[in-house]
Image (tube, rainbow, N blue to C red):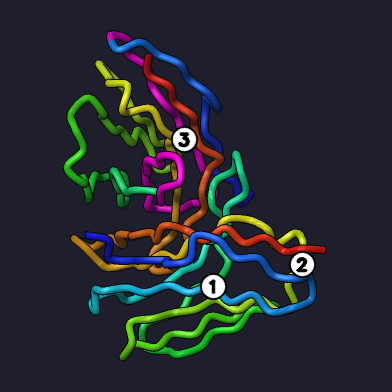
């Protein structure tokens, strides 16, 4: 049972344009959502997060939007740069036994074309 | 220092071997995590330590044995593994109540 899904395995975008990565979830008990970027042979790097009580969070070129009624979130990267080419994971957290537990989506490979 | 280090980077072991993976962070984080990631799959949570106590075990087989000797160190002891346990093993840490996790580069494990 995949509680966090990223339905697009890959995405190609021209440099300077907007990249939009999508994520859907099924568990309404998740309290935070996070986006990570992963390069080959490295661990995931935290990008941005959003609390379940908010609908938007912005940090520089990265903005995350949350639509709770649709159980959907998206990451917007603008403008996209070639260095943004990586695998992006969406993750959701839930408090469990006093500790945060994280569930990751399947990832979307973003390719930014120069 | 915002780094999580993992050793070794690569490990090849036979099914009868005993080996250990090591993870270290000096950010003062009080939660530490082990994840397993297979090719083209998301990281899957294995164990969580909170304030040096095991708080989550995601029904991981007993051939994987975690240990948290102190607040900076996390070990994963491996014994009698199967070839299907071959994967990238990632360690992460976080400082509750902040949510972001910092990941190490991982140990690529191959079980022959």
Q: Tell which of B56 and A21 is nearer to you.
A: A21
Please name the residue shown 21% across and 63% down the image. Answer: A96
Label 2 close to label 1 by CB (< 8 Å): no
Q: Is residue B82 above or below residue A32?
A: above
**Span highlighted in magenta in the image:** B16-42
Residue B88, image x, y percentages: 45, 35
Q: Secondary structure at mark 1?
A: strand
The residue identified by callout 3 is B23
Instruction: Give the Cα distance between marks 2 and 1.
Output: 15 Å
Residue B70, image x, y percentages: 38, 37
Please name the residue shown 57% across and 58% down the image. Answer: A109
Please name the residue shown 36% across and 83% down the image. Answer: A52
The residue identified by callout 2 is A81
How packed mark 3 is, by other alpha carbons closer than 10 Å (few <14, some 14-19, many 20 or more), is: many
Chain identity of mark 2: A
The answer to if B28 sits in the magenta stretch is yes
Chain identity of mark 3: B
The answer to if A2 sits in the magenta stretch is no
Please name the residue shown 26% across and 67% down the image. Answer: A95
């Amino acid at each position: 049972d995949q509680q966090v899904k990223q339905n697009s395995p890959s995405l190609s975008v021209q440099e300077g344009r907007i990249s939009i990565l999508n994520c859907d979830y099924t568990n309404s008990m998740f309290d935070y959502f996070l986006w990570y970027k992963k390069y080959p042979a490295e661990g995931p790097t935290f990008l941005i997060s959003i609390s379940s009580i908010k609908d938007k969070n912005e940090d520089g070129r990265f903005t995350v939007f949350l639509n709770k009624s649709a159980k959907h979130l998206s990451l917007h990267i603008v403008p996209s740069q070639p260095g943004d080419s990586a695998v992006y994971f969406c993750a959701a957290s839930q408090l469990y036994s006093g500790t945060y537990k994280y569930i990751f989506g399947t990832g979307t490979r973003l390719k930014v074309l120069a | 220092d915002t780094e999580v280090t993992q050793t070794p980077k690569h490990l090849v072991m036979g099914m009868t071997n005993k080996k250990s993976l090591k993870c270290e962070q000096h950010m003062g984080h009080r939660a530490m995590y082990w994840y397993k990631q297979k090719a083209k799959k998301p990281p899957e949570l294995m164990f969580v330590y909170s304030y040096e106590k095991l708080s989550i075990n995601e029904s991981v087989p007993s051939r994987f044995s975690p240990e948290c000797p102190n607040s900076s160190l996390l070990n994963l002891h491996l014994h009698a593994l199967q070839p299907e346990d071959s994967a990238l093993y990632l360690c992460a840490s976080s400082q509750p109540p902040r949510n972001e996790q910092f990941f190490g580069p991982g140990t690529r494990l191959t079980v022959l």
